[in-house]
Image (cartoon, rainbow, N blue to C red):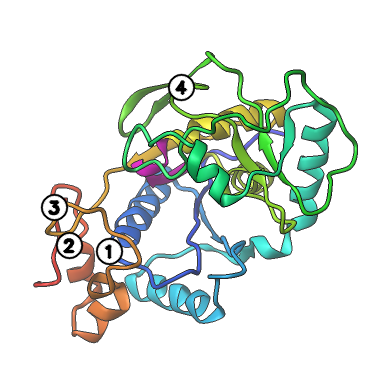
């Protein structure tokens, strides 16, 4: 099936209130979609049962609407799509692309090397559970983590539409990564590529802290025979201490700035790319 000319997406996770970094990325996504004449979809990435809360879902919709960021309804919720993700896991199992991993968090903490970059969220896996030969299976084992077996030494290259040519080496820059959790839910990496393909996304706009995730996801797309969208990774906003914005920055949450009386235009002005350092003293 031919892909549409342009189709983008917003993909917040409801684990806290949206902050200026989200506003910056989502505003960029909207501008690129408007320029291309295509729609944006809204995806509720609510696969973390411990941290996802309905109040944050309602808040993100309210904040995005207040900012003037629009999307094509209906909103997609990942928690309602587990059967689709499970089917992709089954395929990877049959192809021998994944293997079970029973490492505890303590085991992983001992074996994982330090991240190559402080913005990477998944350090290189030490390989304790990796089998020597590829294993095939038709049925996943309940209560077991599964990792994707990366082709060690293979170079993954893509051209980012904002940051240019990007190159990562499997097994060095990143290792075998989790795609299925023992609680019966997919990891971010698997759910993301399945959803992007299923909803015909042609360009992914997100922060540059996910560059290595793009390399991982390209490998998953190849394994599952899914299309690879274009990527546009935005620069990260940082606080006055040089730390990238996160949901812990309550003073820079969109709703906090709203309560202080700022207008949508003022909030969006704070996210201009050239202004990479922001403070709550606006």
According to the picture, the residue beneath numbered tag 2 turns out to be 270
According to the picture, the residue beneath numbered tag 3 turns out to be 275
According to the picture, the residue beneath numbered tag 1 turns out to be 20
Residue farthest to the left, as pictured: 281
Mark 3 or mark 2: name the one nearer the start of the chain: 2
Closer to the camera in the image, 45 or 5:
45
Mark 4 or mark 2: name the one nearer the start of the chain: 4
Q: Is residue 274 above or below residue 167?
A: below
Q: Tell me which residue sits at (77%, 18%) in the image.
A: 133
Mark 2 or mark 1: name the one nearer the start of the chain: 1
Q: Tell me which residue sits at (19%, 85%) in the image.
A: 261
Q: How crowded is mark 4: few (under 14 residues within 10 Å), some or many (20 or more)?
A: some
Q: Is residue 282 above or below residue 24?
A: below
Q: In which quarter of the image is the N terminus?
A: top right
Mark 4 or mark 1: name the one nearer the start of the chain: 1
Q: How far apart are marks 3 and 1 (CA)?
A: 12 Å
Q: Distance between the residues labelled 4 and 2?
A: 37 Å
Q: What number is the disc on residue 168?
A: none
- Residue 22 x, y percent position in the rendering: 35, 60
According to the picture, the residue beneath numbered tag 4 turns out to be 172
Mark 3 or mark 4: name the one nearer the start of the chain: 4
Q: How far apart are marks 2 and 1 (CA)?
A: 8 Å
Badge nearest the viewer, 2 or 1: 1
Residue farthest to the right, as pictured: 138
């Amino acid at each position: 099936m031919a892909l549409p000319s342009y189709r983008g997406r917003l993909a917040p996770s409801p684990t806290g209130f949206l902050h200026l970094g989200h506003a910056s990325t989502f505003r960029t996504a909207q501008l690129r979609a408007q320029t291309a004449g295509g729609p944006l979809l809204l995806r509720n990435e609510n696969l973390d049962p411990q941290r996802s809360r309905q109040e944050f879902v309602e808040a993100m919709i309210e904040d995005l609407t207040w900012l003037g960021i629009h999307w094509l309804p209906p909103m997609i919720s990942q928690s309602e799509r587990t059967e689709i993700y499970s089917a992709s896991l089954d395929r990877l199992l049959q192809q021998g692309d994944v293997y079970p991993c029973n490492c505890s968090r303590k085991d992983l903490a001992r074996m994982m090397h330090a991240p190559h970059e402080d913005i990477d969220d998944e350090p290189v896996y030490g390989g304790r559970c990796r089998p020597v030969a590829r294993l095939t299976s038709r049925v996943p084992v309940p209560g077991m983590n599964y990792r994707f077996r990366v082709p060690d030494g293979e170079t993954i290259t893509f051209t980012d539409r904002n940051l240019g040519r990007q190159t990562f080496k499997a097994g060095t820059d990143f290792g075998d990564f989790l795609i299925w959790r023992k609680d019966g839910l997919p990891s971010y990496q698997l759910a993301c590529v399945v959803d992007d393909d299923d909803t015909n996304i042609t360009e992914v706009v997100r922060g540059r802290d996910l560059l290595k995730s793009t390399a991982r996801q390209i490998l998953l797309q190849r394994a599952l025979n899914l299309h690879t969208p274009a990527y546009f990774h935005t620069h990260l906003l940082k606080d006055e201490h040089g730390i990238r914005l996160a949901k812990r920055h309550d003073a820079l949450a969109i709703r906090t700035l709203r309560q202080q009386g700022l207008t949508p235009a003022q909030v969006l002005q704070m996210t201009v790319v050239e202004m990479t350092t922001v403070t709550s003293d606006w």
